[in-house]
């Protein structure tokens, strides 16, 4: 295992750092600049869909919390008897 690690390390040191790297300023002749796309949005005010998702999530958290409290209360009353 040491021999393999030594071989890999020496091979990494012998290969020049930029042997396979291409300079950043070289652009292939076939490359074309990407077209510029503009997106226009209209702000219509309050987003009812997002409000509904938020209200549903809050309601779900309330139901989970109430269920936890009720479950804990019932477990305590069973142990007290």
Image (cartoon, grey):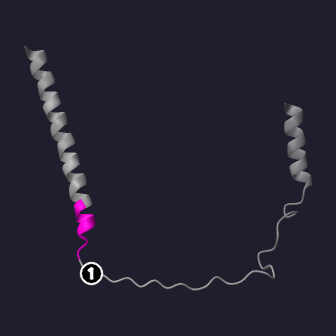
Determine if the magenta segment contains residue 50: yes
Determine whether 50 is above or below 39 in the image.
above
Give the percent coordinates (x, y) of residue 1.
Answer: 84, 30
- Judging by the rendered image, the residue that carries numbered circle 1 is 44
Q: Residues within 10 Å of mark 1 (few under 14, many from 20)?
A: few
Q: Residue at x 27, y 65 (%)?
A: 50
68 and 60: which is toward the camera: 60
55 and 8: which is toward the camera: 55
Give the percent coordinates (x, y) of residue 55.
Answer: 20, 58
Q: Residue at x 90, y 56 (%)?
A: 15
Outermost residue toward the top?
81
Q: Residue at x 38, y 82 (%)?
A: 41
Determine if the magenta segment contains residue 49: yes
Determine whether 63 is above or below 69 in the image.
below
Residue 80 falls left or right of residue 10: left
The quadrant of the image that shows the C terminus is top left
- Determine the image quadrant of residue 73: top left
Residue 68 falls left or right of residue 21: left
37 and 69: which is toward the camera: 37
Residue 23 falls left or right of residue 32: right
Q: Give the tally of numbered discs.
A: 1
Give the percent coordinates (x, y) of residue 16.
Answer: 89, 60
Outermost residue toward the right?
14
Give the percent coordinates (x, y) of residue 37.
Answer: 53, 84
Secondary structure type for disc 1? loop
Region rendered in magenta: 46-52
- Which secondary structure class fits the magenta region best? helix
- Determine the image quadrant of residue 20: bottom right
């Amino acid at each position: 295992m040491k021999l393999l690690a030594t071989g890999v390390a020496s091979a990494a040191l012998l290969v020049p750092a930029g042997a396979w790297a291409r300079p950043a300023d070289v652009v292939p002749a076939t490359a074309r600049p990407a077209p510029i796309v503009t997106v226009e949005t209209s702000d219509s005010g309050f987003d009812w869909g997002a409000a509904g998702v938020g209200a549903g999530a809050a309601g779900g958290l309330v139901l989970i919390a109430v269920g936890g409290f009720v479950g804990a209360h019932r477990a305590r009353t069973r142990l007290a008897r």
